[in-house]
Amino acid sequence: MVRQCVQLASLLTLLGASPLFASGPTGTITGTITDPSGAVVPKARVIVRNEVTNATRDAETNEDGDYTAAVLPPGRYCVAVESVPSAAPPSSADGDGRRGA
């Protein structure tokens, strides 16, 4: 599991929060998940946890490896990545099920 903590007080992109969603200032954490080679990781589970309240918000990376956790109250957050999908091993079987030569 990969973990990164961020302080929302100054790093947070403050949005003009709509009264429909929140009654005070909120922010958004966005990022891109990459593997050790630098390739983006689609469909990874991203967990954003408030370090004071332990409230969590789940997100999933898109095909470009990007994620967004929006409408977060100001605070200090940890970002963890779990359930990274594994790539299927390449198959060398031919269409008839025999191994290729």
Image: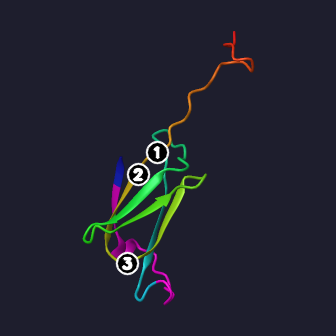
Q: Residues within 10 Å of mark 2 (few under 14, many from 20)?
A: some
Residue at 51%, 60% in the rendered image: 67
Residue at 42%, 80% in the rendered image: 26
Residue at the far front in the pictured view: 96
CA distance for labels 2 and 1: 7 Å
Looking at numbered disc 3 in the image, what kind of residue is underneath it?
Pro
**Dot 2 and dot 3 residues touching (CB under 8 Å):** no
Colouring rule applied to residues: rainbow
- Viewer-closest of 16 and 18: 18
Boundaries of the magenta span: 4-21
Residue 25, compared with residue 42, is above or below; it is below
Residue 48, compared with residue 98, is above or below; it is below
Q: Which residue is mark 3?
A: 73
Q: Residues within 10 Å of mark 1 (few under 14, many from 20)?
A: some
Could you tell me which secondary element the residue under label 1 belongs to? loop
Q: Give residue 49's quadrant in the image.
A: bottom left
- Viewer-closest of 100 and 17: 100
CA distance for labels 2 and 3: 21 Å
Mark nearer the N terminus (1 vs 3): 3
Residue 97 image offset from top left, x and y in percent: 69, 17
Residue 38 image offset from top left, x and y in percent: 51, 43
Q: Which residue is mark 2?
A: 81
Residue at 69%, 13% in the rendered image: 98
Looking at numbered disc 2 in the image, what kind of residue is underneath it?
Val
Residue at 44%, 56% in the rendered image: 46
Q: Is residue 58 left or right of residue 99?
A: left
Residue 101 image offset from top left, x and y in percent: 69, 9
**Dot 2 and dot 1 residues touching (CB under 8 Å):** yes
Q: Which residue is mark 1?
A: 84
CA distance for labels 1 and 3: 27 Å
